[in-house]
């Protein structure tokens, strides 16, 4: 069966470097970090004092106090980016086309704020301390459920979670829905609002976080010899994906085509990646095969690049396994050096940056790469981004549990991707 072609016609973004696609991307292009000292809560009880927080986001002003009390912060984030993406796409959902439009939304951790609030309420007051709204707030499928209700999306609708690979899985699965003819349009995205002292304490006790409290903007340093962990962050991103002919028929602008999707499991360890990079490399190879490209066709590779000792080394090895000698000539970068690690929303935000690299013909930098690790010896575009012809981008993400997910984005061409 011939696959239908799938294109991106709308995007929305909320992250530490900006509250819109263009603002966030311009700061990433310029190498400006969104990481700073924690301001949204008192970090007195934890040893990590830095994070990538969303800034100037007043949910109550946007949605009203009643709605804010009924929903979790992760929902506020996805609401914000869904509105951006739909407005950007010019999509109109009516009773006539509602069953042609669905959504797949994910989160790595989900409604942790609401869960913690319910636990505290129960500890303090027993049953009467738990809101009647607690369960629908906590259920992770509320993200897609509420979004479908807001926009009358009656097509396939569900949530998924693969830890820090969630965003790419949502994009890939939504693409497959359209390719298989089960929808003509899909909203796809991911959200994470999990910056709480308890959660940061857990990551810190795992020895996965950077302790550079005295220099927040230099803390996330992927592929650098002196990296000491990732920086926890929050945010969300949303996309409108369409079957090509549907997009053309309504005169939609087309950002790019999604041409490849690879998805494998390490089946190795709950938190550590395979050191041989075998499964990650396989996901890259599957995505390239589906996109009908070779390593030499890749103009930019957006790395998972978490700034942890294990990830950056294993990812570098996986790229070499998948790409061979061509790996050394592919420009790469980790935008987490500026945003921090948005957990479940990370690869969704990085998909925006990958697509904007095509739009602007620009490869963003990896900042803070001062002393390259000898085991990480590829072209990570240190410090300063560069103009280049960018037609094909591969974005890789990995998640605790051994998830490896790759998406290939290509410049739209009437005759085929690329």
Image (spheres, helix red, strand yellow):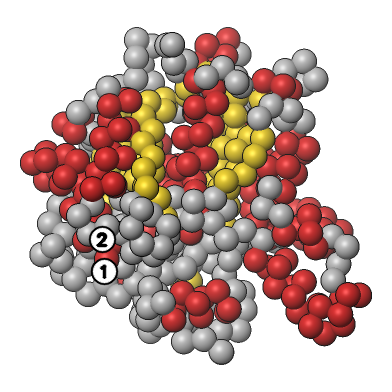
| Residue on which disc 1 sits | 309
Q: Can you tell which mark lies on residue 141?
A: none
| Residue on which disc 2 sits | 312
Q: Secondary structure under badge 1?
A: helix
- In the image as oriented, which residue stretches furthest toward the bottom? 44
Disc 1 + disc 2, Cβ < 8 Å: yes
User: In the rendered picture of this protein, how many numbered marks are placed on residues?
Assistant: 2
Image coordinates of residue 301 in percent, x first then y, are 27, 43
- Vertically, is 259 above or below 68? above
Query: Is residue 371 toward the left or the right of residue 250 in the image?
Result: left
Q: CA distance from mark 1 to mark 2?
A: 6 Å
- Vertically, is 264 above or below 290? below
Q: Secondary structure under badge 2?
A: helix
Image coordinates of residue 279 in percent, x first then y, are 28, 46
Work out whether residue 118 can be spotted.
yes
State which quadrant residue 123 falls in.
bottom right
Work out whether residue 82 can be spotted.
no
Residue at 34% x, 72% y is: 229
Q: 255 or 183: nearer the eye?
A: 183
- In the image as oriented, which residue stretches furthest toward the left? 325
Image coordinates of residue 146 in percent, x first then y, are 75, 44
Q: In what quadrant of the picture does the N terminus appear?
A: top left
């Amino acid at each position: 069966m011939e696959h239908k072609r799938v294109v991106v016609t709308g995007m929305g973004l909320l992250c530490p470097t900006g509250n819109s696609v263009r603002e966030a991307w311009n700061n990433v292009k310029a190498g400006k970090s969104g990481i700073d000292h924690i301001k949204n809560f008192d970090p007195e009880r934890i040893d990590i004092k830095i994070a990538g927080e969303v800034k100037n986001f007043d949910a109550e002003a946007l949605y009203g106090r009643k709605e804010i009390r009924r929903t979790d912060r992760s929902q506020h984030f996805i609401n914000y980016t869904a509105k951006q993406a739909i407005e950007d796409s010019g999509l109109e959902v009516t009773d006539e086309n509602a069953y042609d439009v669905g959504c797949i939304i994910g989160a790595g951790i989900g409604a942790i704020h609401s869960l913690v609030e319910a636990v505290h309420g129960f500890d303090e007051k027993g049953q009467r301390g738990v809101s009647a709204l607690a369960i629908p707030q906590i259920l992770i499928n509320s993200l897609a459920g509420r979004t479908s209700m807001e926009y009358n999306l009656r097509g396939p609708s569900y949530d998924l979670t693969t830890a820090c690979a969630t965003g790419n899985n949502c994009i890939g699965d939504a693409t497959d829905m359209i390719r298989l003819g089960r929808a003509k349009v899909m909203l796809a995205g991911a959200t994470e609002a999990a910056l709480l002292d308890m959660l940061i304490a857990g990551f810190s006790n795992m020895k996965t976080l950077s302790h550079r409290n005295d220099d927040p903007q230099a803390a996330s340093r992927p592929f650098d010899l002196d990296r000491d962990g990732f920086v926890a962050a929050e945010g969300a991103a949303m996309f409108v994906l369409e079957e090509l002919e549907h997009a053309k028929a309504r005169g939609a602008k087309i950002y790019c085509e999604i041409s490849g999707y690879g998805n494998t499991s390490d089946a190795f360890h709950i938190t550590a990646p395979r050191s041989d990079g075998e499964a990650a490399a396989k996901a890259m190879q599957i995505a390239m095969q589906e996109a009908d490209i070779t390593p030499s066709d890749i103009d930019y590779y957006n790395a998972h690049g978490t700034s942890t000792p294990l990830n950056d080394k294993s990812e570098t090895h996986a790229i070499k396994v998948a790409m061979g000698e061509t790996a050394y000539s592919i420009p790469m970068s980790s935008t987490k050096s500026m945003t921090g690690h948005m957990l479940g929303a990370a690869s969704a935000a990085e998909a925006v940056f990958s697509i904007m690299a095509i739009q602007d013909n620009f490869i963003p930098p990896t900042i803070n790469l001062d002393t390259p690790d000898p085991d990480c010896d590829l072209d990570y575009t240190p410090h300063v981004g560069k103009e280049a012809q960018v037609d094909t981008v591969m974005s890789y993400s990995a998640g605790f549990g051994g998830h490896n997910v790759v998406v290939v984005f290509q410049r739209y061409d009437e005759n085929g991707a690329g």
